[in-house]
Amino acid sequence: MALHRSQKLNLLRIAVLLTVALAGLKFFFRDSFTLDQHKGPGGGESGFWGKAGGLKQLAKPWDGPLALTEAKVEAAKREGRKQPVRDFSSTQMRLVHLDLKGAAPKVSYLEQVFPLFSKLGANGVLIEYEDMFPFKGELEVLKSPYAYSEEDIEKIQDLAELNKLEVIPLVQTFGHVEFILKHDKYRHLREVERFPNSFNPHVPETLLLLKAVLTQVLDKHRHSSWVHIGADEVFHLGEGMDSKTWLSRNAGDVGKMYLNHIREVVAFVAGQDWGLQVLMWDDMLRKVSVAAIQDSGITRHASPMLWFYAPNFDTQQIGKYVSKYAECGFKTVWFASAFKGTTGPAQAWTPLNHHLQNHLQWLSVMRSVAKNPSARLQGIVLTGWQRQGLRVELSYDHYSALCELLPVGIPSLAVCLQTLVNGGFNEVTKKKVLGILGFQSMQLEKST
Protein backbone atom coordinates (compact mmCIF):
# COMPACT_ATOMS: atom_id res chain seq x y z
CA MET A 1 0.00 0.00 0.00
CA ALA A 2 2.90 2.35 0.82
CA LEU A 3 4.48 1.48 -2.52
CA HIS A 4 1.22 2.27 -4.29
CA ARG A 5 1.06 5.72 -2.68
CA SER A 6 4.68 6.33 -3.62
CA GLN A 7 3.94 5.51 -7.23
CA LYS A 8 1.03 7.89 -7.20
CA LEU A 9 3.18 10.68 -5.80
CA ASN A 10 5.84 10.08 -8.43
CA LEU A 11 3.25 10.14 -11.19
CA LEU A 12 1.83 13.38 -9.77
CA ARG A 13 5.30 14.94 -9.67
CA ILE A 14 5.91 13.92 -13.28
CA ALA A 15 2.56 15.41 -14.36
CA VAL A 16 3.33 18.70 -12.64
CA LEU A 17 6.80 18.84 -14.22
CA LEU A 18 5.33 18.14 -17.66
CA THR A 19 2.71 20.88 -17.19
CA VAL A 20 5.37 23.40 -16.17
CA ALA A 21 7.57 22.36 -19.10
CA LEU A 22 4.71 22.75 -21.61
CA ALA A 23 3.80 26.15 -20.18
CA GLY A 24 7.44 27.22 -20.49
CA LEU A 25 7.59 26.07 -24.11
CA LYS A 26 4.36 27.88 -24.93
CA PHE A 27 5.65 31.09 -23.35
CA PHE A 28 8.98 30.80 -25.16
CA PHE A 29 7.34 30.28 -28.55
CA ARG A 30 4.40 32.65 -27.94
CA ASP A 31 5.13 34.77 -31.05
CA SER A 32 4.89 31.71 -33.28
CA PHE A 33 1.58 30.67 -31.66
CA THR A 34 0.21 34.20 -32.10
CA LEU A 35 1.16 34.21 -35.75
CA ASP A 36 -0.50 30.83 -36.37
CA GLN A 37 -3.70 31.98 -34.70
CA HIS A 38 -3.99 34.84 -37.17
CA LYS A 39 -3.67 32.74 -40.28
CA GLY A 40 -6.71 33.12 -42.51
CA PRO A 41 -8.46 30.29 -44.35
CA GLY A 42 -6.12 30.79 -47.30
CA GLY A 43 -3.02 30.58 -45.15
CA GLY A 44 -2.23 34.30 -45.26
CA GLU A 45 -1.88 36.54 -42.27
CA SER A 46 -4.99 38.40 -41.23
CA GLY A 47 -5.42 41.53 -39.19
CA PHE A 48 -8.05 42.98 -36.91
CA TRP A 49 -10.60 42.95 -39.73
CA GLY A 50 -8.85 40.36 -41.88
CA LYS A 51 -6.23 40.36 -44.60
CA ALA A 52 -5.62 43.54 -46.60
CA GLY A 53 -6.87 43.41 -50.16
CA GLY A 54 -10.14 42.56 -51.84
CA LEU A 55 -13.55 41.80 -50.41
CA LYS A 56 -13.82 38.20 -51.56
CA GLN A 57 -12.71 36.71 -48.29
CA LEU A 58 -14.27 38.31 -45.23
CA ALA A 59 -12.49 37.66 -41.96
CA LYS A 60 -14.04 37.47 -38.54
CA PRO A 61 -14.37 40.98 -37.13
CA TRP A 62 -12.38 40.34 -33.94
CA ASP A 63 -9.41 38.25 -35.04
CA GLY A 64 -6.73 40.29 -33.22
CA PRO A 65 -3.78 42.41 -34.39
CA LEU A 66 -1.61 41.68 -37.37
CA ALA A 67 1.60 39.96 -36.22
CA LEU A 68 4.53 41.46 -38.12
CA THR A 69 7.73 39.46 -38.41
CA GLU A 70 11.11 41.14 -38.66
CA ALA A 71 11.84 39.26 -41.88
CA LYS A 72 8.67 40.52 -43.53
CA VAL A 73 9.33 44.12 -42.51
CA GLU A 74 12.90 43.96 -43.78
CA ALA A 75 11.71 42.44 -47.05
CA ALA A 76 9.21 45.28 -47.49
CA LYS A 77 11.99 47.83 -46.87
CA ARG A 78 14.28 46.23 -49.44
CA GLU A 79 11.48 46.09 -51.99
CA GLY A 80 10.64 49.76 -51.31
CA ARG A 81 14.23 50.84 -51.98
CA LYS A 82 14.11 49.22 -55.42
CA GLN A 83 11.04 51.21 -56.45
CA PRO A 84 11.59 54.10 -58.91
CA VAL A 85 9.49 57.27 -58.74
CA ARG A 86 5.99 55.93 -59.12
CA ASP A 87 3.51 57.02 -61.76
CA PHE A 88 0.07 57.81 -60.30
CA SER A 89 -1.31 59.43 -63.46
CA SER A 90 -3.86 56.66 -63.97
CA THR A 91 -4.57 56.08 -60.27
CA GLN A 92 -7.31 57.85 -58.40
CA MET A 93 -6.21 58.14 -54.79
CA ARG A 94 -8.49 57.60 -51.81
CA LEU A 95 -6.74 58.74 -48.64
CA VAL A 96 -7.78 58.36 -45.02
CA HIS A 97 -6.78 61.42 -42.99
CA LEU A 98 -5.21 60.73 -39.59
CA ASP A 99 -5.42 63.87 -37.46
CA LEU A 100 -2.87 63.38 -34.67
CA LYS A 101 -3.37 66.69 -32.90
CA GLY A 102 -5.58 65.04 -30.29
CA ALA A 103 -5.85 61.50 -28.87
CA ALA A 104 -3.39 60.13 -31.41
CA PRO A 105 -3.75 56.35 -31.81
CA LYS A 106 -1.01 53.99 -30.70
CA VAL A 107 1.00 52.24 -33.37
CA SER A 108 -0.55 48.95 -32.21
CA TYR A 109 -3.98 50.36 -33.11
CA LEU A 110 -2.79 51.48 -36.55
CA GLU A 111 -1.47 47.95 -36.97
CA GLN A 112 -5.05 46.77 -36.61
CA VAL A 113 -6.87 49.36 -38.73
CA PHE A 114 -4.52 49.71 -41.72
CA PRO A 115 -5.68 46.35 -43.14
CA LEU A 116 -9.25 47.60 -42.70
CA PHE A 117 -8.50 50.85 -44.56
CA SER A 118 -7.12 48.84 -47.45
CA LYS A 119 -10.02 46.38 -47.47
CA LEU A 120 -12.52 49.25 -47.55
CA GLY A 121 -10.88 50.74 -50.64
CA ALA A 122 -8.31 53.25 -49.39
CA ASN A 123 -4.90 53.33 -51.08
CA GLY A 124 -3.22 55.94 -48.91
CA VAL A 125 -3.13 57.79 -45.59
CA LEU A 126 -2.66 61.52 -45.03
CA ILE A 127 -0.90 61.85 -41.67
CA GLU A 128 -1.14 65.22 -39.94
CA TYR A 129 1.54 64.85 -37.29
CA GLU A 130 1.64 68.24 -35.53
CA ASP A 131 3.47 67.65 -32.21
CA MET A 132 3.34 63.85 -32.47
CA PHE A 133 6.38 63.83 -34.75
CA PRO A 134 9.69 63.05 -32.97
CA PHE A 135 11.39 66.37 -33.62
CA LYS A 136 14.96 66.55 -32.36
CA GLY A 137 17.81 68.99 -31.86
CA GLU A 138 16.75 72.62 -31.92
CA LEU A 139 13.18 71.53 -32.73
CA GLU A 140 12.78 69.11 -29.83
CA VAL A 141 10.62 71.62 -27.96
CA LEU A 142 7.91 71.06 -30.59
CA LYS A 143 7.25 67.43 -29.80
CA SER A 144 4.64 66.23 -27.33
CA PRO A 145 5.69 64.11 -24.34
CA TYR A 146 3.56 61.42 -26.01
CA ALA A 147 5.10 61.82 -29.48
CA TYR A 148 5.89 58.81 -31.62
CA SER A 149 9.49 57.64 -31.62
CA GLU A 150 11.60 57.47 -34.78
CA GLU A 151 11.08 53.71 -34.69
CA ASP A 152 7.31 54.28 -34.53
CA ILE A 153 7.42 56.49 -37.64
CA GLU A 154 9.33 53.80 -39.48
CA LYS A 155 6.95 51.07 -38.36
CA ILE A 156 3.89 53.11 -39.39
CA GLN A 157 5.32 53.36 -42.90
CA ASP A 158 6.18 49.66 -42.95
CA LEU A 159 2.61 48.85 -41.94
CA ALA A 160 1.27 51.17 -44.64
CA GLU A 161 3.46 49.55 -47.28
CA LEU A 162 2.39 46.06 -46.27
CA ASN A 163 -1.22 47.17 -46.74
CA LYS A 164 -0.57 49.03 -50.02
CA LEU A 165 -1.20 52.45 -48.52
CA GLU A 166 0.72 55.48 -49.80
CA VAL A 167 1.89 57.66 -46.90
CA ILE A 168 1.57 61.43 -47.31
CA PRO A 169 2.80 63.58 -44.40
CA LEU A 170 1.01 66.87 -43.69
CA VAL A 171 3.04 69.75 -42.25
CA GLN A 172 1.31 73.07 -41.65
CA THR A 173 3.47 75.91 -43.04
CA PHE A 174 1.46 79.13 -42.66
CA GLY A 175 -1.76 78.92 -40.63
CA HIS A 176 -2.78 76.42 -37.93
CA VAL A 177 0.74 76.42 -36.50
CA GLU A 178 -0.25 76.73 -32.84
CA PHE A 179 1.89 73.71 -31.98
CA ILE A 180 4.92 75.79 -33.01
CA LEU A 181 4.03 79.37 -32.12
CA LYS A 182 2.66 78.53 -28.65
CA HIS A 183 6.27 78.16 -27.50
CA ASP A 184 8.04 81.27 -26.19
CA LYS A 185 11.03 80.33 -28.31
CA TYR A 186 9.03 81.08 -31.47
CA ARG A 187 6.59 83.68 -30.19
CA HIS A 188 8.33 86.45 -32.13
CA LEU A 189 7.37 84.72 -35.41
CA ARG A 190 3.63 85.30 -34.96
CA GLU A 191 1.78 87.45 -37.45
CA VAL A 192 -0.15 89.00 -34.56
CA GLU A 193 1.56 88.72 -31.20
CA ARG A 194 -1.66 87.83 -29.39
CA PHE A 195 -2.51 84.85 -31.60
CA PRO A 196 -0.31 81.73 -32.09
CA ASN A 197 -2.08 80.50 -35.22
CA SER A 198 -0.24 82.16 -38.15
CA PHE A 199 3.34 82.91 -39.15
CA ASN A 200 4.69 86.36 -39.94
CA PRO A 201 5.86 85.75 -43.54
CA HIS A 202 8.20 88.76 -43.57
CA VAL A 203 10.65 87.57 -40.92
CA PRO A 204 13.50 85.57 -42.53
CA GLU A 205 13.59 83.23 -39.53
CA THR A 206 10.09 82.00 -40.40
CA LEU A 207 11.25 80.34 -43.60
CA LEU A 208 14.43 79.03 -41.95
CA LEU A 209 12.34 77.39 -39.23
CA LEU A 210 9.92 75.87 -41.74
CA LYS A 211 12.78 74.44 -43.77
CA ALA A 212 14.16 72.82 -40.61
CA VAL A 213 10.73 71.36 -39.73
CA LEU A 214 10.13 70.10 -43.26
CA THR A 215 13.61 68.63 -43.49
CA GLN A 216 13.14 66.48 -40.39
CA VAL A 217 9.72 65.23 -41.51
CA LEU A 218 10.72 64.60 -45.13
CA ASP A 219 13.90 62.77 -44.11
CA LYS A 220 11.65 60.22 -42.41
CA HIS A 221 9.38 59.91 -45.48
CA ARG A 222 11.81 59.22 -48.29
CA HIS A 223 9.32 56.94 -50.08
CA SER A 224 6.46 59.47 -50.18
CA SER A 225 5.43 60.92 -53.53
CA TRP A 226 3.57 63.91 -52.06
CA VAL A 227 3.76 66.17 -49.04
CA HIS A 228 0.85 68.31 -47.87
CA ILE A 229 1.86 71.79 -46.71
CA GLY A 230 -1.51 72.82 -45.24
CA ALA A 231 -1.57 76.55 -46.06
CA ASP A 232 -5.26 76.97 -45.16
CA GLU A 233 -7.07 79.47 -42.96
CA VAL A 234 -4.20 81.88 -42.38
CA PHE A 235 -6.21 83.92 -39.90
CA HIS A 236 -5.09 87.52 -39.20
CA LEU A 237 -2.83 87.59 -42.26
CA GLY A 238 -2.19 91.25 -43.04
CA GLU A 239 -2.91 92.47 -39.51
CA GLY A 240 0.69 92.42 -38.23
CA MET A 241 2.81 95.56 -38.42
CA ASP A 242 5.25 94.03 -40.93
CA SER A 243 2.37 92.96 -43.14
CA LYS A 244 0.71 96.38 -42.94
CA THR A 245 3.96 98.00 -44.04
CA TRP A 246 4.29 95.57 -46.95
CA LEU A 247 0.68 96.06 -48.00
CA SER A 248 1.06 99.84 -48.00
CA ARG A 249 3.81 99.43 -50.59
CA ASN A 250 2.06 96.77 -52.68
CA ALA A 251 -1.44 98.11 -53.28
CA GLY A 252 -2.90 96.13 -50.37
CA ASP A 253 -2.54 92.83 -52.26
CA VAL A 254 -2.98 90.18 -49.52
CA GLY A 255 -3.22 87.43 -52.13
CA LYS A 256 0.21 88.24 -53.51
CA MET A 257 1.65 88.38 -49.98
CA TYR A 258 0.20 84.93 -49.29
CA LEU A 259 1.58 83.51 -52.54
CA ASN A 260 5.05 84.92 -51.96
CA HIS A 261 5.36 82.79 -48.84
CA ILE A 262 3.78 79.70 -50.40
CA ARG A 263 6.08 79.98 -53.43
CA GLU A 264 9.13 79.70 -51.16
CA VAL A 265 7.74 76.68 -49.35
CA VAL A 266 6.77 74.92 -52.59
CA ALA A 267 10.20 75.63 -54.11
CA PHE A 268 11.93 74.12 -51.08
CA VAL A 269 9.85 70.93 -51.19
CA ALA A 270 10.17 70.59 -54.97
CA GLY A 271 13.94 70.94 -54.59
CA GLN A 272 14.21 67.62 -52.74
CA ASP A 273 16.05 64.97 -54.73
CA TRP A 274 13.26 62.42 -55.17
CA GLY A 275 10.59 64.30 -57.12
CA LEU A 276 8.13 65.30 -54.40
CA GLN A 277 4.89 66.98 -55.38
CA VAL A 278 3.04 69.41 -53.11
CA LEU A 279 -0.57 69.35 -51.94
CA MET A 280 -2.25 72.33 -50.27
CA TRP A 281 -5.72 73.24 -49.02
CA ASP A 282 -7.40 75.56 -51.51
CA ASP A 283 -9.45 78.00 -49.41
CA MET A 284 -6.87 80.81 -49.45
CA LEU A 285 -6.63 80.53 -53.25
CA ARG A 286 -10.34 80.96 -53.88
CA LYS A 287 -10.20 84.77 -53.76
CA VAL A 288 -6.79 85.15 -55.40
CA SER A 289 -6.78 86.09 -59.10
CA VAL A 290 -5.84 83.63 -61.81
CA ALA A 291 -3.06 85.95 -62.97
CA ALA A 292 -1.51 86.14 -59.49
CA ILE A 293 -1.50 82.35 -59.12
CA GLN A 294 0.04 81.95 -62.57
CA ASP A 295 2.72 84.53 -61.82
CA SER A 296 3.65 82.79 -58.56
CA GLY A 297 4.80 79.68 -60.43
CA ILE A 298 3.39 77.28 -57.82
CA THR A 299 1.25 75.40 -60.36
CA ARG A 300 4.26 73.47 -61.65
CA HIS A 301 4.76 71.52 -58.44
CA ALA A 302 1.59 71.99 -56.37
CA SER A 303 -2.02 70.84 -56.53
CA PRO A 304 -4.97 72.45 -54.71
CA MET A 305 -7.18 70.32 -52.48
CA LEU A 306 -10.77 71.60 -52.41
CA TRP A 307 -12.46 70.90 -49.09
CA PHE A 308 -16.16 71.04 -48.26
CA TYR A 309 -17.65 69.04 -45.39
CA ALA A 310 -21.35 69.96 -45.36
CA PRO A 311 -23.92 67.40 -46.54
CA ASN A 312 -25.51 69.87 -48.97
CA PHE A 313 -22.69 72.04 -50.30
CA ASP A 314 -23.01 73.89 -53.62
CA THR A 315 -21.69 71.50 -56.27
CA GLN A 316 -21.85 74.16 -58.98
CA GLN A 317 -19.54 76.41 -56.97
CA ILE A 318 -17.05 73.55 -56.75
CA GLY A 319 -17.17 73.25 -60.52
CA LYS A 320 -16.28 76.94 -60.85
CA TYR A 321 -13.29 76.53 -58.57
CA VAL A 322 -12.10 73.49 -60.53
CA SER A 323 -12.33 75.43 -63.79
CA LYS A 324 -10.44 78.34 -62.22
CA TYR A 325 -7.61 76.12 -61.03
CA ALA A 326 -7.38 74.46 -64.44
CA GLU A 327 -7.07 77.92 -65.99
CA CYS A 328 -4.33 78.75 -63.50
CA GLY A 329 -2.32 75.83 -64.83
CA PHE A 330 -2.58 73.29 -62.02
CA LYS A 331 -2.04 69.84 -63.53
CA THR A 332 -4.30 68.06 -61.05
CA VAL A 333 -6.87 68.85 -58.37
CA TRP A 334 -7.80 66.95 -55.23
CA PHE A 335 -10.99 66.90 -53.17
CA ALA A 336 -11.50 66.55 -49.42
CA SER A 337 -14.62 65.19 -47.75
CA ALA A 338 -15.19 64.34 -44.08
CA PHE A 339 -16.08 61.06 -42.41
CA LYS A 340 -16.00 62.50 -38.87
CA GLY A 341 -15.16 65.52 -36.76
CA THR A 342 -17.18 68.26 -38.48
CA THR A 343 -20.46 68.29 -36.58
CA GLY A 344 -19.52 70.00 -33.34
CA PRO A 345 -17.12 69.77 -30.39
CA ALA A 346 -19.65 67.94 -28.22
CA GLN A 347 -20.17 65.13 -30.75
CA ALA A 348 -19.61 61.74 -29.13
CA TRP A 349 -20.93 59.48 -31.91
CA THR A 350 -20.42 60.09 -35.63
CA PRO A 351 -23.69 60.88 -37.46
CA LEU A 352 -23.53 58.42 -40.35
CA ASN A 353 -26.15 59.92 -42.65
CA HIS A 354 -24.63 63.41 -42.38
CA HIS A 355 -21.28 62.18 -43.68
CA LEU A 356 -22.84 59.82 -46.23
CA GLN A 357 -24.67 62.78 -47.80
CA ASN A 358 -21.41 64.72 -47.97
CA HIS A 359 -19.84 61.89 -49.98
CA LEU A 360 -22.83 61.53 -52.27
CA GLN A 361 -22.42 65.23 -53.09
CA TRP A 362 -18.74 64.69 -53.84
CA LEU A 363 -19.62 61.77 -56.13
CA SER A 364 -21.81 64.15 -58.10
CA VAL A 365 -18.91 66.59 -58.42
CA MET A 366 -16.50 63.83 -59.43
CA ARG A 367 -18.80 62.71 -62.24
CA SER A 368 -19.03 66.29 -63.47
CA VAL A 369 -15.26 66.85 -63.34
CA ALA A 370 -14.71 63.65 -65.33
CA LYS A 371 -16.42 65.38 -68.27
CA ASN A 372 -14.05 68.38 -68.08
CA PRO A 373 -10.97 67.63 -70.23
CA SER A 374 -8.99 70.55 -68.77
CA ALA A 375 -9.14 69.27 -65.17
CA ARG A 376 -7.77 65.97 -63.89
CA LEU A 377 -8.89 64.71 -60.50
CA GLN A 378 -6.01 62.94 -58.76
CA GLY A 379 -7.85 61.85 -55.65
CA ILE A 380 -9.93 62.54 -52.58
CA VAL A 381 -9.05 62.68 -48.88
CA LEU A 382 -11.59 61.53 -46.31
CA THR A 383 -10.77 63.82 -43.40
CA GLY A 384 -11.30 62.68 -39.83
CA TRP A 385 -10.79 65.62 -37.50
CA GLN A 386 -10.06 64.99 -33.83
CA ARG A 387 -10.71 68.52 -32.56
CA GLN A 388 -13.37 71.12 -33.33
CA GLY A 389 -14.14 74.55 -31.92
CA LEU A 390 -17.30 76.59 -31.57
CA ARG A 391 -15.98 79.45 -33.72
CA VAL A 392 -14.61 79.26 -37.26
CA GLU A 393 -11.13 80.43 -36.26
CA LEU A 394 -11.00 77.66 -33.63
CA SER A 395 -12.22 74.85 -35.87
CA TYR A 396 -9.87 71.90 -36.21
CA ASP A 397 -6.99 73.65 -34.43
CA HIS A 398 -4.53 72.71 -31.71
CA TYR A 399 -6.56 74.28 -28.87
CA SER A 400 -10.03 73.07 -29.85
CA ALA A 401 -11.93 70.51 -27.78
CA LEU A 402 -11.79 66.85 -28.66
CA CYS A 403 -14.81 65.70 -30.63
CA GLU A 404 -15.65 62.09 -31.50
CA LEU A 405 -12.48 60.03 -31.85
CA LEU A 406 -11.26 57.69 -34.57
CA PRO A 407 -12.57 54.36 -33.15
CA VAL A 408 -16.20 55.52 -33.06
CA GLY A 409 -15.78 57.00 -36.55
CA ILE A 410 -14.82 53.66 -38.13
CA PRO A 411 -18.40 52.74 -39.18
CA SER A 412 -18.74 56.15 -40.86
CA LEU A 413 -15.41 55.69 -42.61
CA ALA A 414 -16.56 52.29 -43.87
CA VAL A 415 -19.81 53.72 -45.23
CA CYS A 416 -18.09 56.69 -46.88
CA LEU A 417 -15.19 54.78 -48.44
CA GLN A 418 -17.44 52.07 -49.83
CA THR A 419 -19.78 54.72 -51.20
CA LEU A 420 -16.89 56.19 -53.20
CA VAL A 421 -15.66 52.77 -54.34
CA ASN A 422 -19.11 51.63 -55.50
CA GLY A 423 -20.32 54.94 -56.90
CA GLY A 424 -23.21 55.22 -54.45
CA PHE A 425 -24.77 53.66 -51.38
CA ASN A 426 -27.30 50.93 -52.01
CA GLU A 427 -28.18 47.58 -50.47
CA VAL A 428 -25.18 45.88 -52.09
CA THR A 429 -22.81 48.50 -50.67
CA LYS A 430 -24.50 48.28 -47.27
CA LYS A 431 -24.12 44.50 -47.27
CA LYS A 432 -20.39 44.83 -47.98
CA VAL A 433 -19.95 47.31 -45.15
CA LEU A 434 -21.83 45.09 -42.70
CA GLY A 435 -19.78 42.08 -43.74
CA ILE A 436 -16.44 43.81 -43.32
CA LEU A 437 -17.30 45.30 -39.94
CA GLY A 438 -19.06 42.19 -38.67
CA PHE A 439 -22.28 44.12 -38.01
CA GLN A 440 -25.74 42.63 -38.25
CA SER A 441 -27.48 45.91 -39.07
CA MET A 442 -26.91 49.62 -39.43
CA GLN A 443 -29.47 52.43 -39.07
CA LEU A 444 -28.11 55.48 -40.90
CA GLU A 445 -30.94 57.85 -40.08
CA LYS A 446 -30.94 57.01 -36.35
CA SER A 447 -27.19 57.56 -36.01
CA THR A 448 -26.91 61.18 -34.91
Image (cartoon, rainbow, N blue to C red):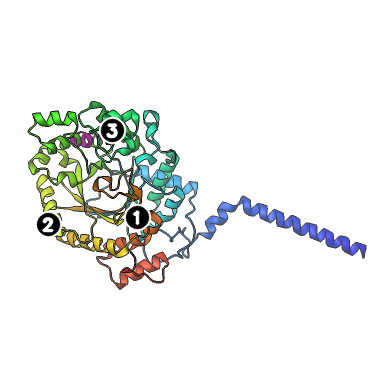
Instruction: Tell me the residue at 39%/29% (across/down).
Output: 137
Give the image quarter of residue 274.
Answer: top left
Distance from disc 1 to disc 2, alpha carbons, whole Å, reads 40 Å
Label 2 belongs to which residue? 372
* Residue 26 percent coordinates (x, y): 63, 54
Give the image quarter of residue 32.
Answer: bottom right
> Closer to us: mark 1 or mark 2?
1
Q: Element at badge 2?
A: loop
Residue contact between numbered discs 1 and 2, judged by CB atoms under 8 Å: no
Q: Is residue 267 magenta?
A: yes
Picture layout, residue 427 above or below residue 80: below
Label 1 belongs to which residue? 346
Q: Is residue 79 left or right of residue 372?
A: right
The answer to whether residue 374 is seen in the rendering is no
Please state which of residues 280 and 239 is positioned toward the viewer in this rendering.
Answer: 239
Quadrant assignment for the N terminus: bottom right
The region drawn magenta spans 262-268
For marks 1 and 3 on the same chain, the one whose residue lies earlier in the sequence = 3
Q: Element at badge 1?
A: loop
The three-letter amino acid code for the residue at tag 1 is Ala
